[in-house]
């Protein structure tokens, strides 16, 4: 739908694999009720829980339980105090399928999915806009001369700490890619080197409508190496199930985008291209498994979204260099700086890919790459 210089589109985001967009909150075993037999995890509403326990004269016992370090199974506490499942609706906010956690022997923490002000899960528009920004960066560096910036990046001082390494060079690269609107200071006619000139101002994406808790499931963390070996880690996240759908709107400022040669088609082309290059430069370096789920976009474009998806899906290191070997060498250096104890120094020589981990999870007995989605623009 067009409104003068603005074009508004409906977006459907369909998860092809489990998707995790974190709230930043971690819940320990005293903050949820885990029923491994039923494969369900319950999340209390704590004000209602306190009121319920107070009505049962159990608040002092609960306070004592919270101070204990050894006894931390909340379900065991409830059972010991004769609080049964029929009582749960009095103080439970929501429940979801426990998924792989039902068989885990070291299940402790839950990383929660982002919720709106009413406590419902949703997809932030900023998450999709961030993924589009990365794809557009990869698309735009295919045009123009970037040799000088490449040399500066390759020659960056690696003796500085991890926080400072490549900070100046990355900032210069992002500004050159995105600060293209040509807005000048009215006082002196000089270009303004600030986000006011960022071309992403021409793209606005709403947050999604609230999603049902039935769309959530707990998923584990399975790090796959190039040879196909999988390391299962005791990290569990609230994730969207494959097949979940979220609905948003995207508004394009057509004249603003036209200034930099972009439109809806070029945005779609950028997403297609980034997905193809992600596979060619990274995904295909990892051995497949007979238990891998077969997923691909059928109507829209592939997009990788959210947390736990890995370095390559959120950066343009592999897209920046015409020779893949240069990208692998730089990614290896970055990984060594950021994660010195994770064995990344051998990435280039031994694995020919960096980082040497593909972020996967398991759902319904099949492996999925984290965060794979289909973005349908209507």
Image (cartoon, grey):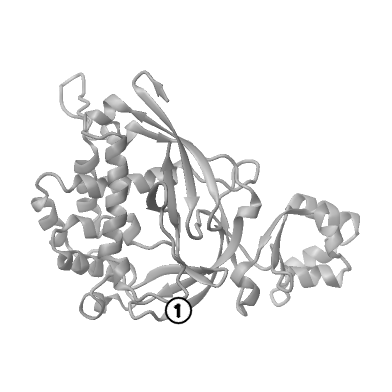
- x then y, percent, for residue 289: 42, 76
Seen at 65% across and 46% down, the residue is 119
Is residue 77 shown left or right of residue 265? right
- x then y, percent, for residue 74: 74, 68
- Above or below, 242 against 14 in this view is below
- x then y, percent, for residue 246: 53, 45
Where is mark 1, residue-wise?
Answer: 231
Seen at 24% across and 66% down, the residue is 331
Q: Residue furthest front?
A: 298
- The quadrant of the picture occupied by the N terminus is top left
- Above or below, 217 against 4 in this view is below
How packed is label 1: few (under 14 Cα within 10 Å), some, or many (20 or more)?
few
Between residues 284 and 52, which one lies in front from this camera angle?
A: 284
Q: Is residue 281 visible?
A: yes
Between residues 62 and 242, which one lies in front from this camera angle?
A: 242
- The quadrant of the picture occupied by the C terminus is top left
């Amino acid at each position: 739908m067009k409104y003068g210089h603005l074009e508004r589109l409906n977006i459907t985001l369909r998860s092809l694999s489990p998707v995790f967009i974190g709230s930043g909150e971690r819940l320990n075993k005293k903050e949820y009720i885990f029923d491994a037999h039923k494969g369900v995890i319950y999340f209390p509403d704590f004000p209602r829980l306190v009121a319920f326990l107070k009505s049962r004269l159990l608040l002092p016992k609960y306070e004592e339980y919270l101070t204990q370090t050894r006894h931390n199974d909340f379900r065991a506490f409830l059972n010991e105090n004769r609080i049964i499942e029929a009582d749960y609706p009095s103080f439970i906010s929501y429940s979801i399928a426990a998924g792989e956690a039902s068989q885990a022997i070291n299940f402790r923490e839950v990383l929660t999915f982002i919720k709106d002000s009413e406590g419902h899960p949703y997809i932030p528009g900023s998450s999709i806009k961030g993924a589009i920004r990365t794809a557009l960066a990869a698309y735009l560096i295919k045009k123009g001369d970037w040799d000088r910036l490449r040399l500066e990046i390759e020659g960056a001082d690696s003796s500085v700490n991890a926080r400072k390494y490549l900070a100046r060079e990355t900032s210069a690269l992002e500004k050159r890619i995105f600060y293209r609107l040509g807005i000048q200071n009215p006082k002196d006619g000089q270009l303004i080197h600030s986000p006011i000139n960022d071309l992403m101002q021409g793209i606005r994406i709403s947050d999604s409508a609230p999603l049902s808790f039935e769309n959530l499931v707990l998923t584990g963390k399975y790090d796959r190496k190039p040879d196909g070996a999988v390391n299962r880690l005791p990290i569990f996240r609230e994730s969207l199930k494959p097949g979940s759908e979220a609905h948003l709107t995207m508004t394009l400022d057509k004249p603003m985008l036209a200034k930099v040669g972009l439109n809806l088609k070029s945005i779609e082309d950028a997403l297609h291209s980034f997905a193809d290059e992600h596979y060619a430069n990274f995904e295909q370096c990892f051995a497949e498994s007979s238990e891998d789920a077969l997923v691909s976009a059928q109507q829209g474009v592939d997009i990788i979204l959210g947390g736990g998806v890995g370095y390559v899906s959120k950066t343009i290191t592999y897209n920046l260099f015409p020779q893949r070997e240069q990208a692998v060498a730089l990614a290896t250096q970055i990984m060594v700086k950021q994660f010195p104890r994770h064995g990344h120094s051998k990435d280039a020589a031994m694995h020919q890919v960096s980082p040497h981990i593909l972020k996967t999870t398991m759902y319904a007995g099949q492996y999925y790459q984290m965060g794979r989605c289909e973005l349908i623009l209507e």
